[in-house]
Amino acid sequence: MTPVVVVKTRGKQLSKLAPVNAQQRLIQLWLHDKPQSTQKCYLRYAAQFTAFLGGVGKAICHTTVEDMVEFSEHLHNRGLAAPTIKTYMAAVKSLLSFAYKTGYIRFNPGAAIKLKKVDQRLHEKVLTLTDIALMIRLTERADYRYKSQQIRDVLILKLLYVAGLRVSELVGLRWKDFTPRERTGQVTVVGKGDKSRHVLLPEYLWQELMDYRGDALKDAYVFPSRKGKGMQPLQRQNVDPIIKDAAERAGLREKVSCHWLRHSHATHNAERGTPVPLIQQTMGHADLATTSGYIHIRPGDSSALHLPRV
């Protein structure tokens, strides 16, 4: 990734390539300045879209507004939730907008598509403090073949909740990102858009992390994969089963994911009266409105409670 490079109009260059190669090159250029985690997701969305177009004998350069509407319906028929469909469509709109700016297509069909606001229903994705405590405590008592793996899973649960990390941020952590601060320490997190933030950790969690580190090198990943001798990170798709197993131990029937712990971090802090800008800073929200949304999903009071019984 070369963030200082700006892609300008390259329509003539792309037009010299074979259609399939031009489409692949277009997607590469579209992704080149995006964070690694975003690239993986957007590449998957683009692959779904181009496969859909291929099914009707089309390519990106032939896309119409009708194709986008039909792609949205195709995603709905696959059983995807409305927020997920919106994410797919936003990525496709971004790709088509880039294709238009580079001169690869003469008009932008995505500009005619307006994405509706979707009810994210965050309140359904917030765990109680008891739920989270059970997930952690029962994982600590679970029967693991390897003790080190058990400690790893417990720390993953704690970091996702206590530090409010995204799963992509979690798996990208290296020991060099941790800095001592008197009796505790802070972790430097690289979030969306390669923006860094510093999260001060509670003393107990800092000590548990340092005990877990042992003699690991500073460039080693905190949660490495089994391959690469600590120099390859745990894949994000391998974190979800850890969370789901912990949720099952706690008797939770919902399909709990990593992001539920992050949602819970924000909601529990908002309920405790933690200043909203501090929550925003810790979680790495670009917009204060995003953080403020957590204040309203489980209100502690409402005018409904102040009316006489009827």
Image (spheres, grey):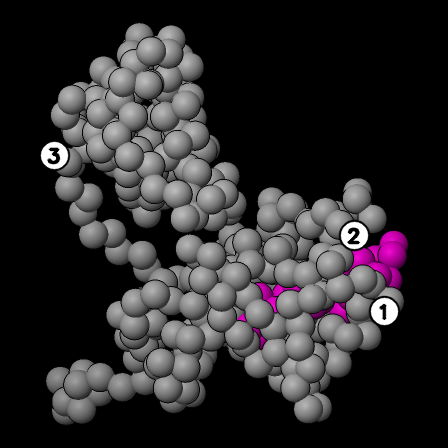
Judged from the image, the secondary structure of the residue bearing numbered disc 2 is: loop
Can residue 69 be seen here? The reply is no
User: Where is residue 72, by image quadrant?
Assistant: top left
Q: Position of residue 242 (x, y in %)?
A: 66, 54
Dividing the image into 4 quarters, which one contains the C terminus?
Answer: bottom left
Give SS at disc 3.
helix
What amino acid type is highlighted by mark number 2? Gly
Query: Which residue corresponds to mark 3?
Result: 112
- Using the numbered discs, state the Cα–Cα distance from disc 3 to disc 2 in whole angstroms: 48 Å
Give the percent coordinates (x, y) of residue 261: 52, 65
Residue at image coords 43%, 38%: 32
Which dot marks residue 253? Answer: none
Residue flagged by tag 1: what amino acid is it? Gly
Asked where in the image residue 30 lies, by quadrant, the reply is: top left
Nearest the camera: 25 or 286?
25
Of badges 3 and 2, the one in the foreground is 2
Would you call the spot at circle 1 few (<14 residues within 10 Å), some (14-19), or many (20 or more)?
few
